[in-house]
Every structure is written in C-alpha cells, then in structure tokens.
Amino acid sequence: MIREITLTPDMDVLDFGCGTGLLTFALQPFVRYITGVDSSRGMLDVFKTKVKEQNLSNIKANYLDLDNGDVLDGSYHLIVSSMTLHHIKNINPLLKQFYSILLPSGQLAVADLDLEDGDFHGNNDGVFHFGFNREELRLIFMDVGFQNIQIHQAAEIEKPVGNGKSRIFTIFLMTARK
C-alpha cells in the first residue's frame, strides 16, 4: 500500500479491520492521524497495548460491529483495509459507508484474496467470500461511485492446506478515489 498510495503528513486515515494494528503501525509515521476499527475486542486490546507501550498520540482504536448495526463515522482522506473484506457478508453497504465518510477526492485501498476454493483459512467460520474476482469487485466499486479504480498484484502467501501440502494464495490491492 505504501508504494501505491501517496501518504502525506496532513492525512487522516481509517484502518477498517485493523486487528492488532500491523497495517496501522506501518502507516502511522507517514500520516497525521489514524483510527483503527475492528469487531474483535481481543485484537483491539492488543492494539491499544501497543499504542500505550509506544506512547503514540496519533493512533486510536474503536470497536465496531457491523452485524449489530454499528456504522462508521468521521471524515477521512484515506480508508485502508487488509484481508478483512472476505469476512464481511454484505460488502456493498460497507463500501457505501466507506464512500460516505471519505472526504472529496479521498482514497480507498483494499487488499484481499483473489478467488480461491476455501482452503486459505482451513476453518471457514466467519468467512463469507473465498476471495474475490477482481473484475466483479471493481464493478461493485464503480456502482458505489468510486473512480480511478486500479488493481495491483500485492503479495503471495504460501500456506499449508493439509496432507503435507502447501499452496500459494495471491493477494490483490484495489485502489480507488471518491
């Protein structure tokens, strides 16, 4: 993401599905303020402990549970999300929320799995999409109103899939502007 997005010291950023903060902490030195949101209180506890231990004043974390009707708020120059979208049952309403809280010309950057057969997680509880067809997801972004949509090959992850075998899964990065 850092290679594909221009980060500036006046940016306010939302990290959706921040988990323990891996992406948040990587972006933090380059932006004004970053807010992480996640539906796992355990992950957020780890996140908040890291913020406190590093004495960082430009990061905060919020609990958000879309399944219970919580909605995103605030205004952001950039929204990022890494490996979270496949855990969201209905992505269209979420993308509409992203669009509504982005400032004019704001950016969205989503990294997630390319379409796969369900082997990535092993246990698929809480997994609603076995990755995404890039073109179909691009069309959903367009329908919501996003422009300048670009798709990049982001990474490959090799994981064991059983029977002593491993497999390579590909990750894309889709960027767009409001």
Image (cartoon, rainbow, N blue to C red):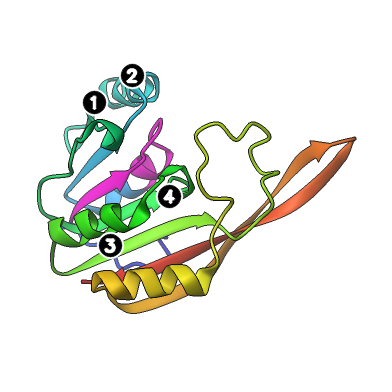
Front label number (3 vs 4)? 4
**Residue at (50, 75) in percent of width and height:** 135
Nearest to N terminus: mark 3 or mark 2 = 3
Which labelled disc corresponds to residue 55? Answer: 1
Nearest to N terminus: mark 1 or mark 2 = 2
The answer for how far apart the CA atoms under marks 3 and 2 are is: 27 Å
Q: Which residue is mark 4?
A: 85
Residue extent of the magenta highlight: 12-26
The answer for how far apart the CA atoms under marks 2 and 4 are is: 21 Å
Nearest to N terminus: mark 1 or mark 4 = 1
**Mark 1 in CB contact with mark 3 (< 8 angstroms):** no
Which amino acid type corresponds to the residue marked 1 in the rendered image? Answer: Asn
Q: Which residue is mark 2?
A: 45
Nearest to N terminus: mark 3 or mark 4 = 3
Determine the image quadrant of residue 150: bottom left
Quadrant where the N terminus is found in the figure:
bottom left
Quick one: label 3, few (<14), some, or many (20+) residues within 10 Å?
A: many
Which amino acid type corresponds to the residue marked 3 in the rendered image? Answer: Leu
Q: Which residue is mark 3?
A: 7
Rendered position, 155 above or below 38: below
